[in-house]
Image (cartoon, grey):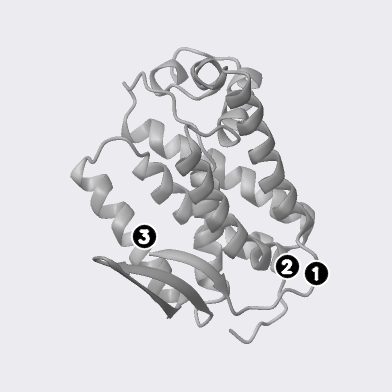
Amino acid sequence: MIPLKDDVPSRHFPIVNITLIIINFFIFIHLVTNNILEYYILTHGVIPRNFFTDFSLVNQLYLFTSAIFLHGGWLHILGNMLYLWVFGDNVEDRMGHLRYLVFYLVCGYAATLVHILADPLSSIPVVGASGAIAGVLGAYLLLFPRARVLTLVPIFIFITFVRIPAVIFLGLWFVLQFINGLGGVQGVAWWAHIGGFAAGMLLIKFFASKQKYYY
């Protein structure tokens, strides 16, 4: 399932969300065009087994932050930025610009930490915004459960468009992450997604405004 748009109007221009998308694309394109993407992933991603031997808080915070803005390929960044585009503007609208930025980063940090705890001996760098974006999805689920998401659904060789309630779309998304995480499916930091999503749901009450929405 590929989300295309939701039906929740934003009251304010989502400057932080759009800036995050631009920064992510700028960094990725810069690294790809200069043929240094792999080097930066190795040196600026978070390697779980190194976490327990590096006691520099400043260095750890830097790596946790830099990893959120690195992506391993075009599909990786396009998928992440699409989800951030569809769901992030409304969460920013509800939180306010600065609180949304802090929320995004904190969810990314929590996601990375959960991934480390799930696979502490791994020497594979973890990179990507998906943990932070998972936090945005968790917040969206609680803020706008009745919103509808226009979704592209491929069925064999056919493509159809369906409006799916956010609670179902995001619920299915989370279940898929959990099943793959338990199944040990390689190549994706499933537990980072799970950790980010859970962090978003837990932190939302500290970041969202009290104004009611009708979704």
Looking at the rendered image, the disc whose residue lies closer to the viewer, 1 or 3, is 1
In-front residue for pair 28/105: 28
User: What is the C-alpha distance between the residues marked 1 and 3?
Assistant: 28 Å
Q: Is residue 20 left or right of residue 123?
A: right
- Image coords of residue 180 (percent x, y): 25, 49
Q: What element carries label 3?
A: helix
For mark 1, what is the residue?
12
Question: In the rendered structure, which amino acid carries the disc numbered 2?
Answer: Asp
Callout 3: 10 Å neighbours few (<14), some, many (20+)? many
**In terms of sequence position, does the residue under pointer 3 or pointer 2 come before the other?**
2
Q: In which quarter of the image is residue 43?
A: top right
Q: Residue furthest left?
A: 183
Q: Looking at the image, is 172 positioned above or below residue 20?
A: below
User: What is the C-alpha distance between the residues marked 3 and 2?
Assistant: 23 Å
Q: What element carries label 1?
A: loop
Q: Which residue does the image show at 61% across and 35% down from the upper left?
A: 69
For mark 3, what is the residue?
174
Q: Residue furthest bottom?
A: 214
**In terms of sequence position, does the residue under pointer 2 or pointer 1 come before the other?**
1
Callout 2: 10 Å neighbours few (<14), some, many (20+)? many
For mark 2, what is the residue?
93
Q: Looking at the image, is 66 positioned above or below residue 50?
A: below
Q: Which residue does the image show at 40% across and 31% down from the upper left?
A: 116
- Image coords of residue 191 (percent x, y): 36, 43
Q: Label 1 near label 2: C-beta < 8 Å?
A: yes
User: What is the C-alpha distance between the residues marked 2 and 1?
Assistant: 6 Å
In-front residue for pair 211/191: 191
Question: In the rendered structure, which amino acid carries the disc numbered 3?
Answer: Phe
- Image coords of residue 120 (percent x, y): 34, 25
Q: Label 2 near label 3: C-beta < 8 Å?
A: no
Q: What element carries label 2?
A: helix
Q: In which quarter of the image is residue 158?
A: bottom left
